[in-house]
Amino acid sequence: MRNSSVLVTVITPAYNVGSWIGESIDSVLAQTETRFEYLIVDDGSTDDTADVVRSRAERDPRIRLIQVENGGSGAARNRALAESAAPFVAFLDGDDRWHPQFLRHMLETLHTAPPGVGMAYCHTRVMMESGQVVALRWQPSGKVDLDKQLVENNPPHNGSSLMIRRACFDQVGGFDSSLPSAVDFEMWLRIATGSNYPLMWGTRRYLLDMRLMRTGSISSNRRRRFECLDKVIAEYAPAMRRQHPGMSYVRPAVFAYRDGLDDFGDRWSLLAREAGTRELARDSWGRSLLAWNSAGRERRAQLRSLRDGARSSAYKGMSGALRTASRVQGLRG
């Protein structure tokens, strides 16, 4: 029998995250909103992931470990969804962590959101593999429809930042387990086009720390990510109504150029240009795309080198600033 007092099912798909999952679990157990169940799906890990989960589960009955053969994050999430029935669902990757107010604030956001909002997401801080926070990630706030999801290239940025009404999954089904990447994005777009809740709502609170490009992460394989993204955009962009579908390729093309995958950048640039050069020139990302596209391969390599150096310096500067702010706050406290 399901516990009717449980408001949120927290789901963590976990694959070889033994070094970090203890921190993720602890961030869930530290939530000020305590009416949750916590399902962790060990997706065929070959490290000590399951052992770390078991040790935490022995101390807190809200944690339940589910072990399956390796099938990817989509299949792992679907397994947990099938064993849960709480009215709200939140996913936390096994290498990320939440602020203690995450569940409480996201529930309040969904309760007060306009009609048609099925998903709410928070802002994200970026941390390195070590756990050191190095940057704040900009994300749009307020209402996000299908067009904005595509043009902004998945505003939540990752699945750990959202809370979702269970009704959305009841209406559109589970995650596409055939996709090795972009699984989250495809699901949010499917909810936007196939459910009674087509809208997202972004809150300005920074309540998630996302581990950036840790060793072995799905997002570290950029070519595979772009291959899946290409498929997802082609499927959902024709449903755009406020803007030209070509605008959905602008940011992905820029990211492809930045990562040195010029084949994707060139092809997506052609699709983006179907929106019209004038439309692209009105958009800051569109102007960036035009610059990258016209630069040529040799010049793009130089731009990438300059950008990578600037980003590394910026991360070091932000990291130092955040440490200083933390020390000041500690002295004040």
Image: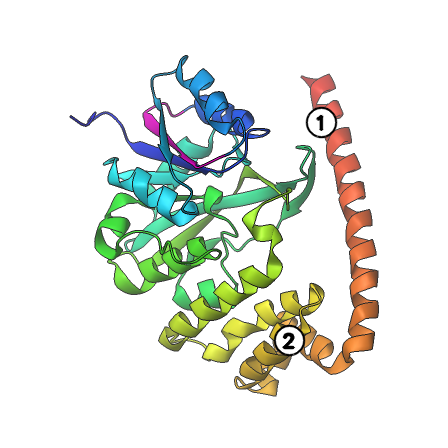
Overall secondary structure of the magenta stretch?
Answer: strand
Q: Residue at x 50, y 35 (%)?
A: 94
Residue 310 point in image, percent of width and height: 81, 55
Q: Is residue 209 magenta?
A: no
| Amino acid at dot 2 | Asp
Q: Secondary structure at mark 1?
A: helix
Q: Is residue 239 visible?
A: yes
Residue annotated with mark 1: 326
Say the numbered circle drawn on residue 263.
2
At 61% from the left and 73% from the top, the residue drawn is 264
Q: Image point 75% across, 23% down: which residue? A: 327
Left or right: 235 with respect to 157? Answer: left
Callout 1, which amino acid? Ser
> Mark 2 touching mark 1, by CB under 8 A?
no
Give, as a single range, the part of the protein colored magenta.
33-45
Q: Is label 2 in a helix, a strand or a loop?
A: helix
On the rendered structure, is 121 left or right of 250? Answer: left
Alpha-carbon distance for marks 2 and 1?
Answer: 43 Å
Mark 2 nearby-residue class (10 Å; few <14, some 14–19, many ≥20): few
Which of the marked residues, 2 or 1, is nearer the chain's N terminus?
Answer: 2
For residue 76, the mark is none
Residue 78 higher or lower than 234, as above or below: above
282 relative position to 232: left or right:
right
